[in-house]
C-alpha cells in the first residue's frame, strides 16, 4: 500500500533532479522536462496523489532523486511559479553566475535543444 501524498497547498507541481545529469526537472505530460512551463499542475488532491505516486515509481526506477511536490501560484500566462524562494532559485539555476541560468529550450551546456 502506498503512502498518501503529503499535505501541500494547491496548485502544486512535482520537482526532482535527473539522476543522470543532476538537472532540476519537473514532471510533464510526456515524462520529465527542464522547462517549468511544461509541468503537470495538480489542482486537486487526487491529482497531487497521482503525482506523488509517479514520484515514488520514478525514484524506485532510479530515474530521479529528491522528488517532491511544491506549491505554486499560476502566473499571468498560466505558468507555475513556486511560492517558496528555495524552489524559485532551484528552477532558475545558479545565482552567482547568471550566464549559466536555466533557459527553457537550451541544454545544460547552453546549446539549443
Image (cartoon, rainbow, N blue to C red):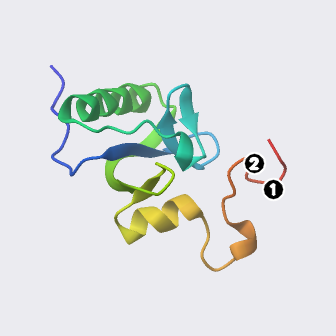
Q: How crowded is mark 1: few (under 14 residues within 10 Å), some or many (20 or more)?
A: few
Residue drawn at x 32%, y 46% as measured from the top left = 12
Q: Are marks 1 and 2 in contact (CB under 8 Å)?
A: yes
Query: Does residue 90 show up?
Result: yes
Q: Is residue 89 left or right of residue 13?
A: right
Depth order, front residue of 100/21: 100
Quadrant of the snapshot with the C terminus: top right
| Vertical position of residue 34 compared to residue 51: above or below | below
The residue that mark 1 highlights is: 110
Depth order, front residue of 89/66: 89
Q: In this view, does 24 lie to the left or right of 84?
A: right
| Vertical position of residue 39 compared to residue 79: above or below | above
Task: List x then y, in percent, for residue 79.
Answer: 48, 50
Under circle 2, the secondary element is loop
Q: In the displayed image of the protein, which residue is found farthest to the front?
A: 76
Q: In this view, does 42 lie to the left or right of 86?
A: left
The residue that mark 2 highlights is: 107
Amino acid at each position: 500500500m502506498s503512502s498518501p501524498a503529503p499535505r501541500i497547498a494547491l496548485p502544486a507541481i512535482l520537482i526532482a533532479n535527473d539522476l543522470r545529469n543532476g538537472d532540476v526537472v519537473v514532471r510533464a505530460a510526456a515524462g520529465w522536462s527542464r522547462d517549468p512551463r511544461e509541468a503537470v499542475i495538480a489542482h486537486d488532491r487526487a491529482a497531487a496523489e497521482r503525482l506523488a505516486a509517479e514520484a515514488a515509481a520514478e525514484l524506485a526506477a532510479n530515474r530521479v532523486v529528491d522528488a517532491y511536490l511544491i506549491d505554486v501560484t499560476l502566473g499571468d500566462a498560466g505558468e507555475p511559479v513556486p511560492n517558496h524562494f528555495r524552489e524559485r532559485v532551484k528552477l532558475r539555476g545558479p545565482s552567482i553566475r547568471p550566464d549559466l541560468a536555466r533557459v527553457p529550450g537550451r541544454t545544460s551546456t547552453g546549446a539549443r535543444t
